[in-house]
Structures are given as C-alpha cells and as structure tokens.
Amino acid sequence: QVRLVESGGGLVQAGGSLRLSCAASGGTVRSYAMGWFRQAPGKERTFVATISWSGAMTRYADSVKGRFTISRDNAKNTVYLQMNSLKPEDTAVYYCAADQTQRHTIVELKEYDYWGQGTQVTVSS
C-alpha cells in the first residue's frame, strides 16, 4: 500500500514562492502518473498539475500555467511542486496523488488511486 506524505506548505506573501514535496513510502511510484490537486475552503478539489512516470510530460491548470512547475525524482520516490508568483487565490490545501494503473499525465481526480493527507498553503495579500 503506497503512502503519500506532503510537506512544504506554509504562509507566504503574495508574489512569494513555496516548494511542495510529496514523498512516497510503502512502495515505489516511479512507474506511476502523479498529480497535485488543491481544495479551497467551501470548494471542490481541483486539478493543479500532473506528470508522467518519466517526467517527460506535464500538464497544468490554466490558472497556474507559467507560475507552477511539477517535477519528480524517481530515485527518491518524490514529486515536487514549485510554486512561484503566488497569489491569494492560490490559498488552499494541496494534495498529492498517484495513479498506479497509468503512466502518462492524468487530469481527472477520480482516476487517482492514492492520496496524501494534504498540506496547507496560505498566501496573504
């Protein structure tokens, strides 16, 4: 059973940066598609970014394109989300997810098999 643990969240001023990490344990995710999602208070969980098993392919939500970068280090069983030029509307709990059946990028939340517990990101204006 794969376990995902996010870290790196916190409070940052608008325009600042944060780097989220998602460490996998209990199994390797090196052949899995991985993704980041976020959920603001009172709203549904939405797609942020996804990366293929090799890291060669990535996709982003329009709202974060050009500001966020997803990457992975399969040797460390870890996925990252570099967030730059943060805005107050980026405030949310950020979740990491893994899909054990697919190797390419996945946008659909329901396709993912494993989820982390989330890490809070708060951007002040």
Image (tube, grey):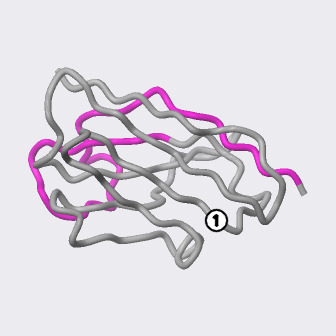
Report the side of 110 relative to 69 (left or right). left
Above/below status of 123 relative to 14: above
For disc 1, the neighbor class at 10 Å (few under 14, some 14 to 19, many from 20) is some
Residue at 45% in and 42% down: 21
Residue at 43% in and 70% down: 60
Report the side of 52 relative to 8 (left or right). left
Residue at 26% in and 60% down: 106
Residue situated in front as seen by the camera: 56 or 47? 56
Residue situated in front as seen by the camera: 111 or 63? 63
Residue 103 picture location, percent across and down? 12, 57
Residue most extreme to the front: 75
Q: Quadrant of residue 89?
A: bottom right
The residue wearing badge 1 is 84
Report the side of 66 relative to 15 (left or right). left
Q: Quadrant of residue 25?
A: top left
Report the side of 86 relative to 5 (left or right). right
Quarter that holds the C terminus: bottom right
Residue situated in front as seen by the camera: 92 or 28? 28
Number of on-image labels: 1
Residue 38 picture location, percent across and down? 54, 48
Residue 121 covered by magenta stretch: yes
Above/below status of 87 relative to 119: below
Residue at 21% in and 62% down: 52
Residue situated in front as seen by the camera: 125 or 37? 125
Amino acid type of disc 1? Asn
| Element at label 1 | loop
Bounds of the magenta segment: 95-124
